[in-house]
Image (cartoon, rainbow, N blue to C red):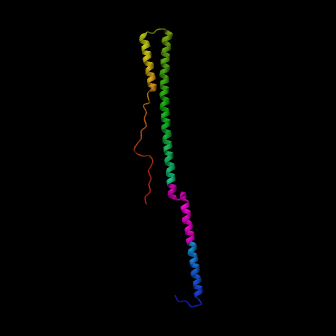
Amino acid sequence: ENFCSQDLPKHHQEHVLELEKIVTDCDAFQQTISEQQQDLNHRPLIQQVNEWERDSIMKIKQTAEDCRKRLIKSTDDNIIEMKKKLNQFIADLRKLRDDDDFNEIHLNDLRVLLEELKKKLEQPLNVSILEEPTSFINKISISS
């Protein structure tokens, strides 16, 4: 555009003000980028990954706790059963001794039964850990 010499300084001043506004906007944008770069944890997708991690860890901990409880219960049940059998064995043993009515066959049967009880206690429980190939935790990944 052509301006008269009177309007030229005014028009130049408007350009200077517009340039300063652009510089200010640019500085603000640069600050926004800097803040986002420094504060990764507040990004929504990062928060979603953090939440997935927490949920997955909780599921694993809960499953591990449930398995421990079942193993302890199985062990406790086995010990209770062994104590019952041992108490019955002791009662039978005392009765034989009190009645004073036993022979070599009775003694041999008692030895065999006691050894069987000992072996059962030493045997590992008929329990195993099964790992299922299907995951109960959803795998996540990033697509771009």
**Residue under the point 52% across and 49% down:** 54
Q: Position of residue 21 (x, y in %)?
A: 58, 75
Q: How many marks?
A: 0
Chief SS of the magenta region = helix
**Residue under the point 57% across and 87% down:** 8
**In the picture shown, does residue 131 fall above or below 81?**
below
**In the picture shown, does residue 43 fall above or below 110?**
below
Q: Is residue 6 magenta?
A: no
Q: Is residue 46 magenta?
A: yes
Q: Position of residue 103 (x, y in %)?
A: 43, 9
Q: Position of residue 143 (x, y in %)?
A: 43, 58
Where are the magenta residues, as a range?
A: 26-48
The extreme left residue here reads 133
**In the image, is 96 to the left or to the right of 10?**
left
Looking at this view, is 30 or 95 the one in front?
30
**Residue under the point 59% across and 86% down:** 9
Which quadrant: the C terminus? Answer: bottom left
**Residue under the point 47% across and 18% down:** 89
Q: Position of residue 102 (x, y in %)?
A: 45, 9
**In the image, is 112 to the left or to the right of 7?**
left
Where on the picture, by quarter, is residue 38?
A: bottom right
